[in-house]
Image (cartoon, rainbow, N blue to C red):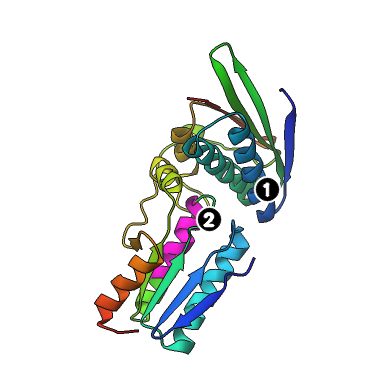
């Protein structure tokens, strides 16, 4: 299941469409870092609204995406973590520390626009 | 009601299949969205342990219960190398594979009853129950 990535001005928006396998997640990590370089993006939004769960592997991989992208000087925002998914993550011991999260795509874009003072 | 769903675990795709079957059964038993997600997350972690450490195994999911109500019973079984120190494996932060190391203690927190039996060279069986609340 490939995750479609849309370019919107200086930002990239990746929208997860369904449950992801480990391989899908690893592919996403690579694709996002590559796209940020090619598009010279300032910010990335990963919309995980459609993700059924966020287990230790998924959260570790998404945190790695954010860290890699930060090393490029860009910022990642994870949006759309469902309430039941958030509940299970905290019970499991996952906090996604150091990663910016936002309620939904709109809030995520607002955050990036403010941060980079962009009108995109 | 005691029909057992068996999911062979060989690849990362099977991890998704197992957790989706677990969630579907939980929802069909009237579990809340939160509890169904807890069941799915616990299955995902156990299935990944099988793929990572034992390469192959099986997850069995079944409806169970008593007069107090229904529960879901999950059994994750593999014939891998086994866990030499279960006490250590159940400690937060412990991992032999360089992962986050919160697999087993995390799973234990997600469920109501948790049991692990492992024999060196023979494999590991993890059982858990989650009751409908």
Residue B19 lies left or right of residue A48; in this view the side is: right
**Residue at horizontal 65%, vertical 26%?**
B63
The residue marked by circle 2 belongs to what chain?
A: A
Q: Is residue B21 magenta?
A: no
Q: Secondary structure at mark 2?
A: loop
| Rendered image: mark on residue A103 | none
Residue B119 visible somewhere in the drawing: no
Q: Is residue B133 left or right of residue B63?
A: left
* Image marks 1 and 2: residues in contact by CB distance under 8 Å: no
Does residue A82 sit above or below A15 in this rendering?
above
x, y percent for residue A17: 57, 63
Parent chain of label 1: B
Q: CA distance from mark 1 to mark 2?
A: 14 Å
Q: Secondary structure at mark 1?
A: helix
Q: Nearer the viewer, mark 1 or mark 2?
A: 2
- In this view, the residue in front, B7 or B58, is B7
Q: For the image shown, how many numbered marks are present on the structure?
A: 2
Q: For residue A85, say whether it is visible.
A: yes
Looking at the image, which residue is at 74% across and 36% down?
Answer: B6
Q: Which residue is mark 1?
A: B17
User: Is the residue A42 above or below the residue B73 in the image?
Assistant: below
The reply to the same-chain question for discs 1 and 2 is: no
Q: Which residue: 59% across, 59% down? A: A18
Which x, y percent locates residue A15? 51, 68
Residue range in magenta is A54-66
Callout 2: 10 Å neighbours few (<14), some, many (20+)? Answer: some
Closest to the observer, B123 or B49:
B49
In the depicted view, which residue is nearer to us: A95 or B35? B35
- Residue position for label 2: A51
Name the spot of residue A79 as percent of width and height, x first: 40, 62
């Amino acid at each position: 299941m490939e995750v479609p990535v849309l370019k919107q001005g200086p930002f990239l928006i990746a929208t997860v469409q369904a449950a992801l396998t480990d391989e899908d997640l690893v592919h996403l990590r690579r694709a996002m870092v590559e796209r940020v370089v090619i598009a010279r993006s300032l910010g990335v939004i990963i919309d995980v609204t459609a993700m059924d769960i966020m287990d230790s592997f998924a959260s570790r991989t998404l945190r790695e995406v954010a860290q890699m992208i930060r090393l490029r000087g860009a910022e990642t925002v994870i949006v759309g973590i469902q309430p039941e998914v958030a509940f299970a993550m905290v019970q499991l011991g996952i906090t996604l520390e150091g990663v910016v999260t936002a309620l939904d795509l709109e809030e995520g874009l607002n955050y990036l626009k403010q941060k980079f003072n962009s009108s995109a | 009601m005691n029909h057992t769903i068996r999911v062979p675990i060989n690849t990362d795709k099977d991890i998704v299949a197992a957790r989706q079957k677990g969630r579907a059964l939980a929802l069909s038993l009237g579990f809340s969205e939160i509890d169904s997600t807890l069941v799915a997350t616990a299955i995902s972690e156990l299935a990944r342990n099988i793929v990572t450490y034992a390469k192959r195994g099986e997850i069995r999911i079944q409806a169970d219960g008593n007069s107090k109500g229904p529960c879901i019973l999950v059994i994750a079984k593999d014939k891998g190398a086994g866990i030499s120190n279960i006490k250590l494996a159940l400690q937060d932060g412990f991992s032999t594979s360089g992962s986050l190391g919160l697999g087993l203690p995390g799973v234990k927190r997600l469920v109501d009853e948790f049991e692990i039996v492992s024999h060196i060279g023979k494999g590991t069986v993890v059982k858990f129950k989650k009751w409908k609340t």
